[in-house]
Image: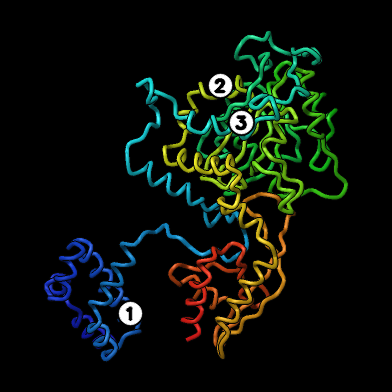
Amino acid sequence: MKGTAKSDLFRELPAVDELLHAPEVARLAAETGTAAVTDAARAVLARLRQEIASGLLDGPALQIALRGLRGAIEEQLRQALRYSLRPVINATGVILHTNLGRAPLAEAALAHVRETAGYYSNLEFEIEAGVRGKRDVHVERLFQRLLADGETRAEFSAGHRPAGQPGAPPPQHAKSGRAGDPGAVPTRTQVSTIVVNNNAAAVLLALNTLAEGGEVIVSRGELVEIGGSFRIPDVMAKSGAILREVGTTNRTRIADYEKAIHERTRLLLRVHRSNFEITGFTEHASGAELVELARKRGLPLMEDLGSGALVDLESLGVSGEPSVLDSLRAGVDIVTYSGDKLLGGPQAGLISGRADLVGRMRANSLFRALRVDKLTYAALEATLLAYIKRDHDAIPVLKMMRLTRDKIGTRAEALAGQVQSTKMKAEVSDGESVIGGGAAPSAVLPTRLVALSCEGLSADELAAHLRASDPPIIARVEEGRVLLDLRTVLREQDEMIAVALDRIAR
């Protein structure tokens, strides 16, 4: 009996061709295209068949569904034709949220990307000379200004002379000084910068250029795993360099590095532990000790900073996170870092340091495979110009970090008062924001949180309703409550959250 009843219900479903000839669906096809409407109609009918087969639809319910076919097809079209990559509201308080795209771009960067993308550009063209140019020039000039060291501007501090210069110790195990040798250091060292598609690519290119076939010495306590299960040892292996681990997980002394140096050593590597901490019985070689050893033995010293701040973060309440300039001033030869973390720009891997070493990387055929496009250069150029102008609040990441607890609290109180109702309860309490993105793991910023609960909904269900909003709102769930941290919410998005919560409550 049940099988017969279901068969009758299946016969009630129209054929796709019949459905497409219905006037209201035919008009929809004329507006959005026959192929797209046909696919949507098939999907809707398939869903109805599945619901009949599973017993979810009886005769009366099916008739209601059939009367609403045009609306169901329209909704299916919206789902199928809208962008998969969508903007969301980040109410988690994690400033550099890797899953949410890390750093949002500055308005000037967005404008420059639109302008550059919509027209031809001088990406690799020298306008004055009328000849082919290099894409590096659009940001190289800005990096040189930002990484200038006092009066020497694009040069390293005179207090950190490379081996072979007056006042520097003589190199040991150094090469002859010919261009291209790992130990060769020019008499005048300038800072240069190149851009690849992310920091892992920057590390790969640098190691491949400076140490392919040779050994790279690194502390066991710095063999970190970055996002997506990518590990530094794996990246090193792909580069063709040979990993030489020294020390232990928690203790590595400068003597451990020195003992490991021999004729096949090409590079000393320091990896900043930006996404974890080791505490307790620990010891590690200082940057100054590594610089001194590298100079004494005529080896380049490379530091993978990861996050790569261009400003002093101490003023923002973040300690223990060195800036790119700090490392270069200390005498590090090559620094690799990300563009979309503490710098606040687009995804990119940046390599800054001695011009002769960076020049070798630029000449490496791997550089072309890893280089970035005009849109990345446009966004990066605009971001760097904000630094040049000292307009730090124009960079969303820095502005979020600079927000005080009181300013966030004022917005939190206003939002809580706006959404408070008989069904929706909102309380404001103290909390902490984090940097995220593998940057400054121990740093927290004081904030004020809006804690939400809704009658008839669990915390997980309320969070799911928020994610189903347009745009989706991503919140934290802790101790049975939904928490909103407005530090990472743009001010104009406060009202969007209020509207979404009012709709959920009703």
Residue type highlighted by circle 2: Gly
Q: Earlier in the sequence, mark 1 or mark 3?
A: 1
Q: Are marks 1 and 3 in contact (CB under 8 Å)?
A: no
Residue 240: tell me if it is visible.
no
Image quadrant assignment for residue 255:
top right
Q: Secondary structure at mark 2?
A: helix
Q: Secondary structure at mark 1?
A: helix
Please report whichever mark, 2 or 1, sits nearer to the chain's N-terminal start.
1
Q: Answer above or below: position of 444 versus 270.
A: below
**The disc label shown at residue 359, or none:** 2
Residue extending farthest right: 281
Task: State the residue at coordinates (46%, 36%).
Answer: 372
How far apart are the alpha carbons under marks 2 and 1?
64 Å
The image position of residue 187, as x and y in percent, is 68, 13
Between marks 2 and 3, how big is the CA–CA gap? 11 Å
Q: Position of residue 366 (x, y in %)?
A: 49, 27
Across and down, in percent, residue 399 comes to 61, 55
- Front position in the image: 322 or 365: 322
Image quadrant where one finds the N terminus: bottom left
Q: Mark 2 vs mark 3: which is more N-terminal? A: 3
Residue drawn at (40%, 32%), measured in percent from left and top?
123
Left or right: 354, with 419 as reference point: right
The label on residue 352 is 3
Q: Residues within 10 Å of mark 3 (few under 14, many from 20)?
A: many
